């Protein structure tokens, strides 16, 4: 099953009044480095600090009143939970967010601050997902998955429409890659408007589940490890319905980054671009700095989020701690 341009256009119309159209800015430093125009799509400036608000909002607005009022539940590495809590609150619905012990404390606190009921379960996204399934079965809650869901994918795809509208000659889009909701939605929108454009997924080398699944030719389980790009952690789901096939068919390549390379992306975003960006949001910048992708023409880097612990960010920017060190 796939999500196409029509569903993404409908999502754009549905969510337009509920969130920000984020800016596309030029990066002088990266343009000089790469020898071609480089632009940053700043989803980090979204109301909840990440792109996830698009998919969550589209999913919540697509539900019936009855499904919303039963209460909503999800598993999250932080940003989707925050987005669902925000979207549910706006519609007067209850949200339950299940997260593992690997989720940074600042992200857990942010979800709670939006009124969600937070459950910390196990040490992986898969552990948190088991609690979601229990709550759906036993309490009748309505699940809004973080990525493998038609309305979520279509919502994330609206970023691709905005990229095309603001940079119609785009040659390459770099997209953070985790479970694939963002990458598949953006790729569907970009290639629906401009088939010749390239879309490359960028992930961390530590526990890149979609990359390993694509290599295997099917969804596979991958151990979830600590990483600066914590928002990219978790599996793709062995019963994946949408994102595996869409990433397989639509992405032109996937590149992986070391922890030190991700740290350099975070530092560059702050020092050269004036943007506070979390590890997952910095992977596109990091891929350019590390010369992991071939730049041929106008390139858009999707900066997906800003929700990094402030103390950790200060350590990284000031070089006071090795990138592989523990998280605050």
Image (spheres, rainbow, N blue to C red):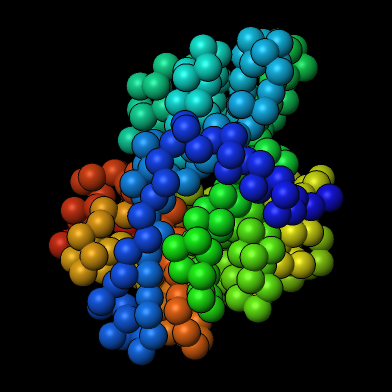
Indicate left or right for 279 with 13 as reference.
Answer: left
Residue pictured at 68% horizontal, 73% vertical: 195
The image shows a total of numbered marks equal to 0
| Closer-to-camera residue (112/52) | 52
Task: Please say if 184 is above or below 169.
Answer: above
| Residue 70 position in % (x across, y down) | 67, 10
| Residue 219 position in % (x across, y down) | 77, 56
Please indicate, yes or no, whether residue 251 appears anywhere in the rendered image.
no
Task: Please say if 116 is above or below 101.
Answer: above
Residue pictured at 38% horizontal, 70% vertical: 39
| Closer-to-camera residue (297/53) | 297
Task: Please say if 282 is above or below 235.
Answer: below
Residue pictured at 42% horizontal, 16% vertical: 115
| Residue 61 position in % (x across, y down) | 61, 26
| Closer-to-camera residue (312/87) | 87
- Which of the 4 image quadrants contains residue 95? top right
Q: Quadrant of the C terminus?
A: top left
| Residue 80 position in % (x across, y down) | 52, 37
Residue pictured at 65% horizontal, 78% vertical: 196
């Amino acid at each position: 099953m796939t999500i196409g341009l029509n569903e993404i256009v409908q999502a754009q119309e549905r969510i337009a009044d509920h969130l920000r159209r984020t800016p596309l800015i030029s990066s002088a430093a990266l343009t000089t480095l790469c020898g071609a125009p480089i632009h940053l799509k700043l989803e980090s400036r979204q109301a909840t600090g990440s792109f996830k608000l698009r998919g969550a909002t589209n999913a919540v607005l697509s539900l019936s009143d009855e499904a919303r009022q039963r209460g909503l539940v999800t598993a999250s590495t932080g940003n989707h939970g925050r987005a669902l809590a925000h979207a549910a609150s706006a519609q007067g619905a209850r949200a339950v967010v299940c997260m593992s012990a690997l989720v940074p404390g600042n992200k857990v606190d942010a979800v709670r601050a939006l009124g969600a009921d937070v459950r910390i379960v196990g040490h992986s996204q898969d552990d948190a997902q088991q609690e979601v399934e229990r709550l759906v079965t036993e309490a009748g809650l309505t699940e809004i998955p973080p990525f493998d869901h038609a309305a979520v994918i279509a919502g994330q795809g609206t970023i691709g429409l905005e990229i095309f509208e603001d940079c119609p000659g785009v040659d390459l889009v770099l997209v953070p890659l985790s479970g694939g909701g963002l990458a598949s939605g953006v790729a569907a929108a970009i290639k629906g408007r401009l088939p010749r454009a390239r879309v490359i997924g960028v992930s961390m080398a530590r526990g890149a589940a979609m990359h390993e699944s694509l290599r295997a030719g099917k969804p596979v389980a991958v151990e979830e490890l600590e990483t600066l790009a914590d928002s990219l952690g978790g599996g793709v789901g062995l019963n994946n319905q949408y994102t595996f096939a869409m990433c397989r068919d639509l992405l032109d390549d996937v590149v992986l980054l070391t922890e030190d390379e991700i740290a350099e992306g975070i530092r560059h975003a702050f020092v050269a671009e004036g943007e506070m960006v979390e590890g997952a949001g910095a992977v596109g910048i990091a891929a350019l700095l590390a010369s992991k992708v071939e730049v041929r023409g106008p390139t858009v880097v999707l900066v997906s989020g800003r929700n990094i612990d402030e103390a950790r960010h200060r350590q990284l920017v000031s070089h006071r701690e090795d990138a592989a060190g523990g998280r605050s």
